[in-house]
């Protein structure tokens, strides 16, 4: 059982996943940010690997990625930073990124190194389901990494059920068909969240995109297992001078 699966076995409601960008606000901030999240109430960490063309990311996360790339962040440097991760961070950790840099690193090498440093799962939004089934899923499973697919309000029920069969860890329910950090009213998606609940899917469900405060967190948690916060936290990190204080103050507004 992976750390992600253990988390959802222990905690079925109000699971809080925080997204942070590796190498932001400074190149060597990665472990400091992760430790601050652990110390201040996060349940799960989604660690973003910066990329120059992030399809699903809104302006705030794009900017944090641009800063991280300017700071010199690469996948190789990230794995170096994570070598001692499990001495200090005990939460489940997911790597989120895009296929291009992962393929340049070497897909199997990437999975092997991720497993070696203690990563629990992957989110790769531009890995199609067909290619996961035909080529990459076997490699991911070989290294005992959970793989989290994204679903949207437009995903048909039949496809939802197939994605649920292929996913492990949890399903990432995108609250609306836009990018991260959107300002749409999440309460308008109540019917979508109810549908996901009523389908009685195998995997837990976390809602992402547009979760930014206690109100939106509570709205997401009403019908699902929890929520993912990215842009609002990145903004707080960028505005704060002290990582731990900025993290503490932000999480106090959520939980």
Image (cartoon, rainbow, N blue to C red):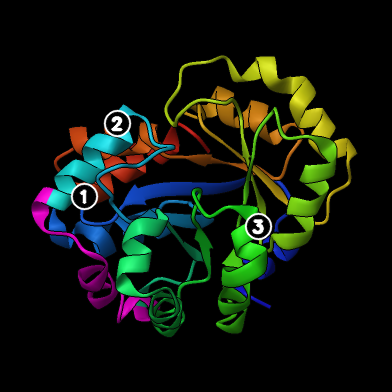
Image location of residue 153, percent across then percent down? 69, 28
Dot 3 falls on a residue whose secondary structure is helix
Mark closest to the chain's N terminus, 3 or 2: 2
Instruction: Look at 36% across and 37% down and name the residue there.
Output: 233
Taking 96 as reference, is 234 left or right?
A: left
Q: Tell me what residue is drawn at x 82 percent, y 48 percent.
A: 161
As drawn, is 89 to the left or to the right of 15?
left
Q: Which residues are magenta?
A: 70-87
- At horizontal 41% and vertical 51% (from top left) the residue drawn is 40
Q: Position of residue 55 (x, y in %)?
A: 40, 38
- Pointer 1 with pointer 2, Cβ within 8 A: no
Residue 186 at what x, y percent from top left? Answer: 61, 20
**Residue 95 drawn above or below residue 205:** below
The residue under label 1 is: 24
Residue labelled with disc 3: 130
| Distance between the alpha carbons at the discs numbered 3 and 2 | 31 Å
In front of the other: 150 or 237: 150
Separation of marks 1 and 2 at Cα, in angstroms: 12 Å
**Would you name the residue on which mark 2 appears?**
60
Position of 218 with respect to 228 (left or right) is right
């Amino acid at each position: 059982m992976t750390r992600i699966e253990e988390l959802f076995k222990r905690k079925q409601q109000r699971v809080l996943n925080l997204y942070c960008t590796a190498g932001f606000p400074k190149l060597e901030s990665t472990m400091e940010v992760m430790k601050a999240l652990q110390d201040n109430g996060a349940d799960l960490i989604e660690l973003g690997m910066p990329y120059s063309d992030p399809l699903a990311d809104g302006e705030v996360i794009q900017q944090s990625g641009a800063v991280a790339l300017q700071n010199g962040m690469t996948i190789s440097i990230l794995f170096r930073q994570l070598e001692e991760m499990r001495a200090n961070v005990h939460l489940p950790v997911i790597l989120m990124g895009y296929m291009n840099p992962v393929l340049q690193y070497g897909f199997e090498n990437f999975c092997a190194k991720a497993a070696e440093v203690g990563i629990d799962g992957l989110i790769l939004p531009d890995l199609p389901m067909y290619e996961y089934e035909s080529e990459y899923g076997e490699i991911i499973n070989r290294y005992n990494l959970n793989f989290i697919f994204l679903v949207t309000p437009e995903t048909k029920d039949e496809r939802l059920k197939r994605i649920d069969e292929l996913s492990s860890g949890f399903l990432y329910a995108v609250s609306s068909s836009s990018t991260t950090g959107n300002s749409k009213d999440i309460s308008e998606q109540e019917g979508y969240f109810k549908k996901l609940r009523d389908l009685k899917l195998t995997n837990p469900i976390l809602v992402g995109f547009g979760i930014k405060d206690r109100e939106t967190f509570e709205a997401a948690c009403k019908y699902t297992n929890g929520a993912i916060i990215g842009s609002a936290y990145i903004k707080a990190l960028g505005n704060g001078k002290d990582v731990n204080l900025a993290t503490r103050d932000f999480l106090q507004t959520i939980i």
